[in-house]
Image (cartoon, rainbow, N blue to C red):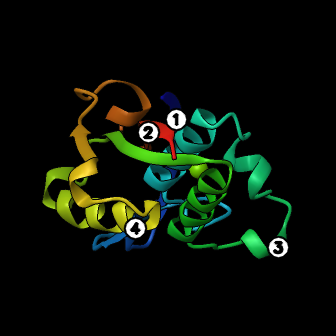
Amino acid sequence: MRSGIGYDSHRFAPGGPLRLGGVDIPGDVHLAGHSDGDAVAHAITDALLGAASAGDIGHMFADGDPANRGRNSIEMLHLAAERVRASGWRVANADVSVVTEQPRISDYRDAMRGALASALGIGVDDVSVKGKTNEGMGWIGRGEGLACIAVVTLTRG
Ligand code: MG
């Protein structure tokens, strides 16, 4: 059994919707990024690749590659899961915490779990999504962006 940790942060930019955990959340901001900015999917992808010692998301999906511009991060997560499975691992579970003042993650928790589970090829019960505020402190508290921390566990397939 192996575990990996992933972290990601993105800045809010004007204009919705906000793509997070594969879900389009209505509102007036989105996450700026080379891809679709989905920090939840990015943190889980890094945790997944980390658990398999298979590099990181920036190595697998280079920023400089035009094919990755505006790319659907759930599709990137799916491809990373395929790579990890091909090297003999089975995804056991994923857990992610989203640190943000807005939106309220619990309103979208089950939709995100469904999208992430399907990308990872595991059951919804094996995916956890949790929301935290930063108690108004620092750049997250000022609403400049959000951060995600994820853990993925693998077992030998
Ligand atoms: Mg990212």
Q: Which residue is mark 2?
A: 147
Residue at the spot of label 3: 66
Question: For the residues carrying marks 4 and 2, which lies nearer the camera in this image?
Answer: 4
Res 99 quadrant in image: top left
Does dot 2 land on a helix, a strand or a loop? Answer: strand
Comes first in the chain, label 4 or label 2: 4
Q: Circle 4 — which element? A: loop
Residue 104 seen in this snapshot: no
- Secondary structure under tag 1 reads strand
Name which residue type carries label 4.
Gly
Compared across the picture, whether 72 is left or right of 145 comes to: right
Measured as percent of width and height from the top left, residue 115 is found at: 35, 68
Mark drawn on residue 155: none
**Residue at 35% over, 44% down:** 93
**Relative side of 67 to 124, left or right:** right
Single out the mark in the foreground, 4 or 3. Answer: 4
The residues bearing labels 2 and 1 have C-alpha atoms spaced at a distance of 7 Å
Identity of the residue drawn at 44% across and 39% down: 147
Task: Tell me how far mark 1 sits from mark 4, CA to CA.
Answer: 17 Å
- Please tell me which of labels 1 and 3 falls first in the chain: 1
